[in-house]
Amino acid sequence: MASERAPVVVVMGVSGSGKTTVGSMLADRLGVGYGEADDFHPQANVDKMAAGQPLDDDDRRPWLAAIGAWLEERQEAGAVATCSALKHAYRDTLRSHAPSTVFLHLHGSRELLEERMGRRSGHFMPASLLESQLEILEPLDGEERGLTADVALTPEEIVDRFLVWWQEPAPG
């Protein structure tokens, strides 16, 4: 049976997938707090990405811990946070803080993602880093509770699909 409590959701995916748009919309629809992943980065990470250098696991560790702690504080009330969460291990880190976390993986074609990144202005993440993110992306597996949505859909359609999925009984 679906939970009556609001979920703890991480909207995940590579840069340009629409995490901010979908995440803030989902938080509004659920009536829960919203955490923007970019706000959790230490300045050194922002500087590194702005210089066109991909982050490594050591760079991501404090960032993931900060997002995880934020989610942990909001487990009872529910929350939505964005986070690329590209690797299974990164998602494990988030769930180590907030075990009930579910994921909404925004997935799209390389061409669409590149087009979206090219239209962005004022963001520190250059389009040149998309390839490095796609190379390490590990899609959700059967052990992780979540939904994958095609970013060719509108943000409203993605949020609607997630809300329907959330209300469905959990398998098993």
Image (cartoon, rainbow, N blue to C red):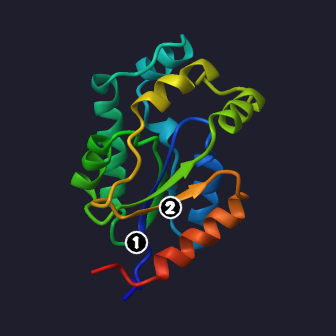
Residue at the farthest left position: 96
Q: Nearer the viewer, residue 158 or 33?
A: 158
Pointer 2 or 1: first along the chain: 2
Res. 103 mark: none
Give the residue drawn at x 47%, y 13%. 53
**Residue 125 picture quarter:** top right
Give the residue drawn at x 41%, y 85%. 4
Q: Position of residue 155 (x, y in %)?
A: 69, 58
In this picture, is 142 found above or below 92?
below
Q: Quadrant of the C terminus?
A: bottom left
Kindly identify the amino acid type of the residue bearing the numbered disc 1: Ala
Q: Position of residue 8 (x, y in %)?
A: 40, 64
Residue designated by label 1? 77
Residue designated by label 2? 33
Task: Confirm whether residue 159 shows in the render.
Answer: yes
Task: Confirm whether residue 31 shows in the render.
Answer: no
In this picture, is 81 found above or below 110?
below
Residue at the farthest bottom position: 1
Give the residue drawn at x 40%, y 80%. 5
Q: Nearer the viewer, residue 24 or 84?
A: 84
Give the residue drawn at x 70%, y 26%. 122
Q: Quadrant of the N terminus?
A: bottom left
